[in-house]
Image (cartoon, grey):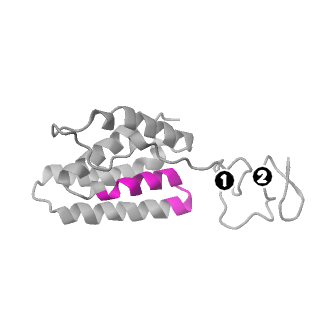
């Protein structure tokens, strides 16, 4: 049992506020409607080896192996440490995959299509992060890879494969 920061009454579990004093809009990662004292974890920075700044492709023109292996595994573990699940990412993954499928089925799809639709996904990610649906670390991940993903068709496909590898490596609950 804790003590409410506002009124001093006893709280259920280890929460900062009682149910009468909780700040409006506060949501707990535990599914409750007010924040737990344990919910103060700092979202860690993205590991440097999981950030692709120049290209998802090696000098030989093929996608880098770490896109499918080490980097994807580390990002999947980081997302899971932040209590993210495949389900929480599914909507955004499906949106990225829809762009990928359009590019593969219609080779004449202009670069502007990638830019416009991917930036819509970025905006939706920002919105979902503010609502607490996705974690800040995922917003950082998307924002960090934004410029590279919209650079050209090939790089977008590399990003889509990287995202797919991360989601595939996440364990289901």
Q: Residue at x 66, y 53 (%)?
A: 28
Residue in front for this viewpoint, 148 or 77: 148
Residue in front for this viewpoint, 70 or 21: 70
Looking at the image, residue 135 sits to the left or right of residue 144; the answer is right
Q: For marks 2 and 1, give the CA distance.
A: 9 Å
Residue tagged 2: 15
Q: Residue at x 42, y 43 (%)?
A: 48
The relative height of residue 133 versus residue 123 in the rendered view (above or below) is: above
Disc 2 crowd, CA 10 A, few/some/many (<14, 14-19, 20+): many
The label on residue 28 is 1
Q: Residue at x 18, y 38 (%)?
A: 62
Q: Position of residue 159 (x, y in %)?
A: 29, 48
The relative height of residue 86 versus residue 7 in the rendered view (above or below) is: above
- Which is the main secondary structure of the residues drawn in magenta? helix
Residue in front for this viewpoint, 145 or 95: 145
Q: Residue at x 69, y 67 (%)?
A: 24
Residue 127 shows in this picture: yes
Q: Position of residue 33 (x, y in %)?
A: 69, 57
The relative height of residue 78 versus residue 131 in the rendered view (above or below) is: above
The label on residue 158 is none
Q: Secondary structure at mark 1?
A: loop
Looking at the image, residue 165 sits to the left or right of residue 125; the answer is left
Q: Secondary structure at mark 2?
A: loop
Give the quarter of the image for residue 102.
bottom left
Q: Which residues are magenta?
A: 129-147
Taking the magenta stretch, the answer to whether it contains residue 135 is yes
Q: Position of residue 143 (x, y in %)?
A: 40, 57
Taking the magenta stretch, the answer to whether it contains residue 20 is no
Q: Position of residue 167 (x, y in %)?
A: 40, 40
Q: Are marks 2 and 1 in contact (CB under 8 Å)?
A: yes
């Amino acid at each position: 049992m804790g003590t409410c920061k506002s009124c001093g009454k006893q709280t259920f579990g280890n929460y900062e506020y009682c149910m009468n004093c909780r700040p409006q809009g506060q949501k707990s990662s535990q599914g409750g409607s007010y924040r737990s004292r344990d919910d103060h974890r700092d979202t860690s920075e993205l590991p440097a080896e999981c950030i692709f700044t120049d290209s998802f492709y090696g000098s030989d023109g093929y996608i880098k192996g770490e896109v499918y292996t080490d980097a994807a595994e580390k990002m999947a573990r980081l997302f899971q440490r932040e209590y993210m699940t495949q389900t929480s990412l599914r909507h955004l993954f499906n949106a990225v995959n829809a762009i990928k499928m359009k590019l593969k089925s219609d080779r004449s799809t202009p670069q502007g299509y990638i830019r416009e639709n991917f930036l819509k996904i970025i905006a939706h990610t920002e919105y979902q992060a503010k609502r607490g649906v996705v974690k800040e670390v995922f917003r950082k991940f998307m924002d960090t890879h934004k410029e590279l993903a919209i650079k050209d068709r090939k790089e977008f496909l590399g990003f889509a494969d990287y995202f797919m590898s991360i989601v595939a490596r996440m364990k289901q609950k």
